[in-house]
Image (tube, rainbow, N blue to C red):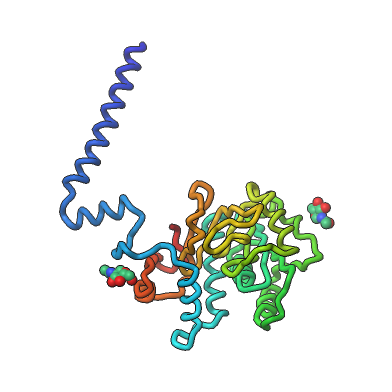
Amino acid sequence: MSSRRGSRVYNCVVVVICIALFIRLSVIFCWTPYCKSVLQSTLSNDHSSNMSSLRVVSSKLAAQIDQELMGPKIGFTLQQLMELAGLSVAEAVQREFPPAATRKGVLIVAGPGNNGGDGLVCARHLKLFGYDPVVYYPKRSSRTEFYGQLVKQLDFFNVPVLSETENWTQYLNPDRTLCVVDAIFGFSFKPPMREPFAEIIKRLHAVQESVPIVAVDIPTGWDVDAGPVEKPHLTPKVFVSLTAPKPCTNHIDPAKTVHYVGGRFIPQEFAQQHGFEQFDYKGVNQILKL
Ligand SMILES: *[C@@H]1O[C@H](CO)[C@@H](O)[C@H](O)[C@H]1NC(C)=O
Ligand SMILES: *[C@@H]1O[C@H](CO)[C@@H](O)[C@H](O)[C@H]1NC(C)=O
């Protein structure tokens, strides 16, 4: 009995060695350009033809790109970029947390600035995708009329927008909420974290294992370059970099976080001119898993 088991193990080992040899040999004897290119794209993640192009852009370059996009030569408006950003994040939510018949809640926590604006847009798209989004928007900016218009659109779509005094923590309940979209602070965050956001982060941190977090561009409390600087810091389950990943994404633990790039704002030539990767989005997709 035991010798039969032994010979089965032996057979298994032989098969494994044969497979390994076959892979090894096919690498050595794969010398035609076509064969090489197929092999390269199977073995590595890098589908770009320009091997020197960067997956991560510096915060300085990222700021410069934003300025150029909204500058006189290219002529995007902030609102347009926000619309595409919010749509990308909604698509990432849909990809990772598809709505179920009994569970389709998403809590969006929106900060006072542009990151919050992305969240307000995201909430509207999530409603169209079949979710029951709820927005917590404790500090509303009156700096531009635009944020108020985004809130009116949410009213139009019957998406509740909670103010500071309302009970938002009831939505931190895994029985009804699939995930939380962290649209509080992003690129421009500088410590220290002020209230009410310090308390909000504490609450989100306490439940992030059961109610996963989707980060918009930069998780709240992370530094664009240095990564997690505040304590406690959020560890998002889903990280959506906009335009291109910033240096803080080097702190992502792939075992804990799924990383997407989103925000299809630029043509391939522009990426190439600036020396970063031309992300290979497929068809109508607004996001690409990295
Ligand atoms: C908010 O709602 C939850 C769940 O219904 C409840 O446990 C909690 O005490 C409420 N918090 C406040 C401040 O009312
Ligand atoms: C790759 O990117 C670099 C940096 O922008 C650029 O100088 C170079 O011409 C590119 N090479 C190719 C083959 O596209």
* Residue 59 pos. (x, y %): 50, 68
- Which residue is at 32% across, 15% downward? 4
87 relative to 32 in the view: left or right: right
Quarter holding residue 79: bottom right
Whether residue 270 is visible to the viewer of this picture, yes or no, is yes
119 relative to 31 in the view: left or right: right
Figure quadrant of the N terminus: top left
In the image, residue 232 sits, relative to residue 18, either above or below, namely: below
Quarter holding residue 77: bottom right
Q: Residue furthest bottom?
A: 72
Ligand 1 found in image quarter: bottom right
- Which residue is at 74% across, 58% downward? 199
* Residue 121 pos. (x, y %): 61, 72
* Residue 29 pos. (x, y %): 16, 46
In the image, residue 69 sits, relative to residue 261, either above or below, namely: below
232 relative to 254 in the view: left or right: right
Task: Out of 43 and 95, give the one closest to the viewer.
Answer: 43
- Which residue is at 23% across, 41% downward? 24
Quarter holding residue 226: bottom right
Task: Out of 248 and 112, give the one closest to the viewer.
Answer: 248
State how many labels appear. Answer: 0
Whether residue 102 is visible to the viewer of this picture, yes or no, is no
Figure quadrant of the C terminus: bottom left
Task: Out of 269 and 60, give the one closest to the viewer.
Answer: 60
* Residue 229 pos. (x, y %): 60, 57
- Which residue is at 46% across, 74% downward? 265
165 relative to 175 in the view: left or right: right
